[in-house]
Amino acid sequence: MNASSPIRPTQTAYRSVFISDVHMGTRGCRAEFLADFLKQTSCENLFLVGDIIDGWRLKRSWFWDKHHDEVLRLILKAARSGTNVVYVPGNHDEMLRKYISLNIEICGVKLQMEAEHTTADGRKLLITHGDSFDSVVRHAKLLALLGDWAYTTALVVNRYFNMVRTRFGYPYWSLSAWLKLQVKEAVKAIDRFETALADDAKSRGFDGVVCGHIHHAEMRQVNGVMYLNDGDWVESCTALVEHFDGRLELVDWVARNKLSMLARPAPKLSVAPAAALQAVVAEFTAPQSEPPATHVVSAST
């Protein structure tokens, strides 16, 4: 641990934390759970692995509550306190990709198309959101938007479905996740996605790959490479963490804290967003330009 470490004794300390697919700006985002996780966690490296803010949704409708504000505040506070914060934009926050070639930082947060990180025990990890390995996102944007609508609809149905389950004494169960795993072609698509990412990382000399995108937390070996998907903060509420000895672990925040996915506070919508947030929203509504070619910028520690 270096002399300027932001680790605090009252928090759980990790060397690195990886989170993705928060989808702030959507009603399905569990920002209150993520804010709770960030308050109770300290780390030397924080990697935001894409789809943190959902530009697709915010372009169509505005939803932003106090928990969204709190998540942004905690991330920026971590950056100011000495945490190395790296933001790798995904497809839902792709409007930020055009700034990557400028090598700028936003309030201490580094923007990178991809990153690499070396664990404490010497393993080299590629960090990428993963949408470039999704043929639908790359070549059929309309289908991707349709899929986004279907997923949002499934989340709404899922909520009412679980309300009925709880009345009969059954625990929370993700209908949308179950449907995704039951559809044969969806299972094949997930397998192709994992294999493609692992093979690309292996061909480039990495020992593993950290990604998000498909909202399916996983940590396993694929063709001799560590495939590490940190999940999401819509349904699974998971994060990938690195301990100080290099050990990697998936943290299920809901299961660990016995939280209820059905318990939601009444949202208090932000009436006057901060200037920084207004600037981000302006980017969501601006005409989109083609992102720069993919390249790897080192963020190793």
Image: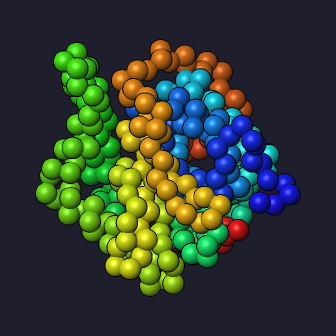
Residue 21, compared with residue 261, is above or below; it is: below
Left or right: where 60 falls relative to 101: left
Residue under the image location 70 percent in, 63 percent down: 102
Examine the rendered structure and indicate whether residue 121 appears above or below residue 57.
below
**Viewer-nearest residue: 272 or 80:** 80
Residue 86 position within the rendered picture, expressed as x and y whole percent measured from the top left: 65, 57
Name the image quarter holding residue 160. top left
Give 210 or 2, whichever is nearer the viewer: 2
Residue ranking furthest to the right: 3
Q: Quadrant of the N terminus?
A: bottom right
Please state the horizontal and vertical placement of residue 280, each as a whole percent of the image.
62, 41
* Residue 2 shows in this picture: yes
- Give the colouring mode of the picture: rainbow
Residue under the image location 53 percent in, 29 percent down: 32
Residue at left offset 37%, top offset 49%: 215
- Vertical placement of 173 versus 164: above or below? below
Number of dots carrying numbers: 0
Q: Is residue 301 above or below residue 16?
A: below
Depth check, front residue: 12 or 164: 12
Instruction: Let me know if residue 29 appears in the view.
Output: no
Quadrant of the image occupied by residue 140: bottom left
Q: Could you tell me which quadrant the C terminus lies in? A: bottom right
Left/right placement of residue 32 relative to residue 166 reads: right
Q: Give the percent coordinates (x, y) of residue 264.
A: 43, 20
Query: Looking at the image, which residue is at 62% across and 30% down?
Result: 69
Percent coordinates x, y for residue 125 in the rendering: 54, 71
